[in-house]
Image (spheres, rainbow, N blue to C red):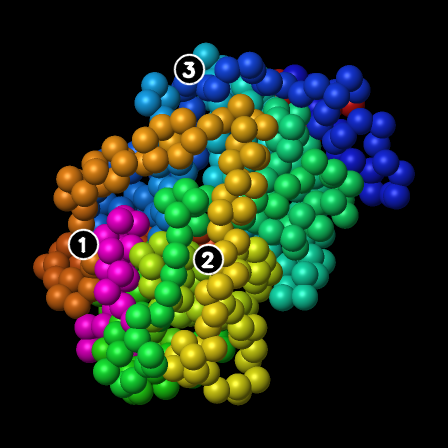
Amino acid sequence: MPALSAPPASDERPTAEPGRREDGTHLGRRPAPPARILLRSPKDPFTVVSPEDAFRHNLIGTNAGNLVFLQATWKILGLPGTSLTADGLHVHPRRADEINERFDAYVLPLANALRPSFEDTLLQLTALIRRLRIPVVVLGVGAQGTLAGDMERLRPIERCVRAFVAAVLDHGPSIGVRGELTLDYLRGLGFRDVEAIGCPSMFLDGPRLRVAKRVPELTPASTIAINVSPYVGAMGSVVAEHVERYPRLVYVAQDLDTLGRLLWGESAAAGADACAMPVHVSHPLFTERRVRFYVEPWPWIEGLRGMDFVFGTRIHGNIAALLAGTPAFVLAHDSRTLELARYFGIPHRILRDDGTRIDAARLYEEADYSSLNEGHAARFEAFTAYLRAHGLTTVFADGDGGRAFDERVARTAFPGAVGGEACRRHGWLASTTGRARHRIHRAVRSARVRRLRVAALRLLDAAGPDGDRAG
């Protein structure tokens, strides 16, 4: 397949859509719904693994929130007669021939993939997609910018973003993005066939979703779950105040590092730099056994079903609550969280590091779920229309509404929450080994190693698909 040209940076419009042939056609258009789908996912939803294995093999994709939208996609597309296969999050262009032979479509549920720290994966995905002869369907990709929608920080990866979007559009009629901020960003790069479709996670139950308050107000006796992005420093004071104010509050963590701490503990030196954020086992949330971590979405959603309220900076931590019918509130700290909250009508507030006091009781009082509830059916129809345009259908349109999937979930013994007694439950050798693995994994994910990978991948990309430098 020839290298794809990026859209021009000037105001001149291309004669054909970026990544599109002059006659308006694209690769991979097929008349019948695909029966064999390759899905971007670490594993099959019903392959049960222990929390230890989930950590060792990073089966949460570094953030457990990924599980919510990835496994929702399994349910949505799981029609009788359709075979879904996980790609294991393994992306390599050399797999193209195998994928072309074995599958009819490649579906990519993505989160905030348009960001500098994901450039290496985007480069690999682009190289792979260029070699495919089957449809490629992107579900809900997002750009990560500021709260004001400023995408200047993405300028260093603009060429990579252009190439990725062009490759996707060469294999389908459009690309589905999270919301208006990402839509505006890609249209600003010259791409016209961009649709805001939200995130598959919110459509776990298709057109059915209703959230309502269960108690008139929150009190110190209320059951509350907080979710925290460890890198958002403004949450430090919020956590500290709520730990004291609400004795029944628990912290539902999502990052791989916290899972490692719960499983293996950490050295005394690691906890020496104690801070207000729950990123060390000497934090009150750890010492009081108020931290929970789920390596599967189903126990997570069920665990939040009994809560009075959920709030914090994690968009999918709050979506998991909404899927359980539990009121949730997003503290938006960047464009990726803000645009999804806006798109779905999720109650939210801008989180600013200016000393503004936040109280869960006040958030609960001001939360209004009318827009979320009343607009859900229309948003689901837009999502399914996007799928239909790409030759895909859902269990809600042509299946049993997901009943068989839900029944299988109910029959499956998934691991419950890691937390409380799980912290330091292993022996000395296992804990030491686990912490060593943890350090190695963090080193592999370091910015320096990532920059080296990106440099190597850029060289390969410049060499062309067959290793010859493009001229």
Question: What is the number of the mark on residue 373?
Answer: 2
Q: Earlier in the sequence, mark 1 or mark 2?
A: 2
Question: What is the number of the mark on residue 416?
Answer: 1
Q: Which residue is mark 3?
A: 102
Which one is nearer the viewer's eye here, 127 or 436?
A: 127
> How far separated are the C-alphas under marks 3 and 2?
40 Å
Q: Indicate yes or no whether the magenta region holds residue 41.
A: no
Disc 3 is placed on an element classified as: helix
Point out residue 177 in the picture as x, y percentages from the top left corner: 59, 44
From the image, which quarter does the C terminus lie in? Answer: top right
Q: Quadrant of residue 220?
A: bottom left
Please say if 237 is above or below 316.
below
Give the residues in magenta.
280-308
Residue in the image at 29% along x and 84% along y: 219
Q: Quadrant of residue 324?
A: bottom left
Point out residue 11 in the picture as x, y percentages from the top left corner: 88, 43
Callout 1 amino acid = Gly
* Eye-nearest disc, 1 or 2: 2
Q: Residue furthest left?
A: 427
Please say if 384 is above or below 132.
below
Callout 3 amino acid = Arg
Q: For this view, does 150 lie left or right of residue 83?
A: right
Which one is nearer the viewer's eye here, 448 or 118?
A: 118
* Eye-nearest disc, 3 or 2: 2
Residue in the image at 21% along x and 36% along y: 408
Pointer 3: residues within 10 angstroms few (<14), some, or many (20+)? few
Which one is nearer the viewer's eye here, 309 or 278?
A: 309
Point out residue 157 in the picture as x, y percentages from the top left corner: 67, 47
